[in-house]
Amino acid sequence: MVVKNNLRVLMAKKGVNIQDVSDATGLSRKSISKLYNETSIQITFDVIARLCTYFNCEVDDLLTLEKESD
């Protein structure tokens, strides 16, 4: 199993870019960019909470667990 994030989808629905999310959440642009491009290897509870607050969503709207392809 692998954890995936839906940041790209949430951003598209809200019509915002990486800088907008960074400015609104106080998270670094680099952190948002790594999540957006799915190159991030870890995410803290604080980051999850800030993003969920900003997007007015639940954790399972932001993060999903998927089976790895063979």
Image: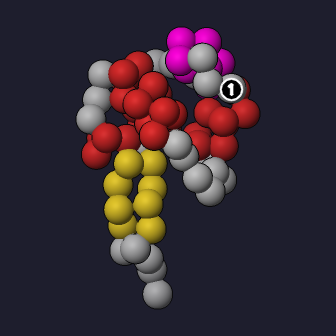
Query: Of helix, strand and loop, which one carries label 1?
Result: loop
Q: Which residue appears farthest toward the front when viewing the image?
A: 45
| Above or below: residue 35 compared with residue 70 | above
Give the colouring mode of the picture: secondary structure
Say which of 61 and 43 sits in front.
Answer: 43
Q: How crowded is mark 1: few (under 14 residues within 10 Å), some or many (20 or more)?
A: few
Left or right: where does residue 65 sit relative to residue 28? left
Res 9 → quadrant: top left
Is 44 contained in the magenta span? Answer: no
Q: Which residue is drawn at 53% across and 18% down?
A: 25
Image: magenta residue range: 18-25
Q: In this rendering, does residue 20 appear at all?
A: no
Q: Which residue is drawn at 27% across and 35% down?
A: 58
Quarter placement of the N terminus: bottom left
| Above or below: residue 12 compared with residue 64 | above
Give the percent coordinates (x, y) of residue 52: 37, 29
Res 6 → quadrant: top left
The residue that disc 1 covers is 28
- Indicate the amino acid at tag 1: Ser
Q: Residue at x 61, y 24 (%)?
A: 27
Q: In this rendering, does residue 25 appear at all?
A: yes
Left or right: where does residue 62 sit relative to residue 7? left
Give the percent coordinates (x, y) of residue 54: 41, 19
